Amino acid sequence: MVCQKIENYLITSTYKKSRCRRRAQPIRLEDLSEVITDLESEMDRSQIEKVFDILSQNYPLFSEHDNEWMSDGVNSTPFKNSVSVTLSTMTHTKRVIRAAVELFSEVSTPHELEQLTDEHLREIFKPVAHYSRKKITLKEMCRQQIEKQGGKVPQFRE
């Protein structure tokens, strides 16, 4: 009875929260607070946790499906973050991450990015939209960071 109540909530909440009804979004434990409150009168906390452990094997939790930007490290430094954001304009996230991961396997500073050839950058950026223009923009951004900021990404807007 209790498992069924939680499972029904999981199903209806993933259905409601998904933008596309065919694809379920991960559930956050915070979203389940109302169900937990209802169940606390019927079960003790350890029983509730056991039920959630069993159900989480079938329903993904947000913590298990981390933000792709975080898990792939494309925003782990200010430099990587600024480059990834520049690549993301008018491009699907998965394509940006694919290009950024490939790029960051070779470079980690503006100096290194500026030294790559245009042809090589074009090949790396091919998955993203407007890759030729973004290559030019990123090279210019790196050049300005080197000249004006000593190769460091500014921490504040100026």
Image (tube, rainbow, N blue to C red):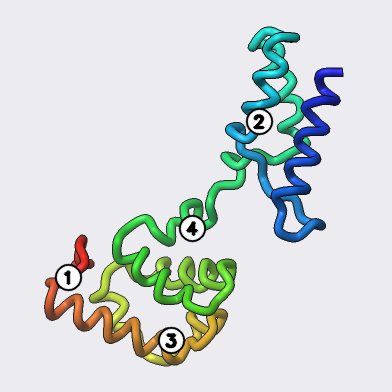
Residue displayed at 42% across by 69% down: 84
**Amino acid at the residue labelled 1:** Glu
In the figure, 116 relative to 27: above or below? below
The crowd level at tag 1 (other Cα within 10 Å; few <14, some 14-19, many 20+) is: few
Q: Which mark, by number, is residue 69? A: 4
Q: In the visual, does 40 lie left or right of 86?
A: right
Can you tell which of label 3 and label 2 is closer to the viewer? Answer: 2
Q: In which quadrant will I find the N terminus? A: top right
Q: Earlier in the sequence, mark 1 or mark 2?
A: 2
**Residue 117 image position (x, y, % from top left):** 36, 89
Residue linked to disc 1: 158
Can you tell which of label 4 and label 2 is closer to the viewer? Answer: 2
How far apart, in angstroms, are the residues tagged by discs 4 and 2? 25 Å
Along the viewing direction, whichever of 99 and 34 lies nearer the viewer: 34
Q: In the visual, does 60 lie left or right of 132?
A: right
**Amino acid at the residue labelled 3:** His
Q: Earlier in the sequence, mark 4 or mark 2?
A: 2
How far apart, in angstroms, are the residues tagged by discs 1 and 2? 43 Å
Q: Which mark, by number, is residue 55? A: none
How far apart, in angstroms, are the residues tagged by discs 4 and 3? 23 Å
Asked whether the beta carbons under mark 1 and mark 2 sit within 8 Å of each other, the answer is no
How far apart, in angstroms, are the residues tagged by discs 3 and 2? 48 Å
Total labels drawn: 4
Along the viewing direction, whichever of 34 and 46 lies nearer the viewer: 34
**Residue 114 image position (x, y, % from top left):** 28, 82
Dot 3: element? helix
The crowd level at tag 3 (other Cα within 10 Å; few <14, some 14-19, many 20+) is: few
Residue linked to disc 3: 120
How far apart, in angstroms, are the residues tagged by discs 3 and 1? 32 Å
Dot 1: element? loop
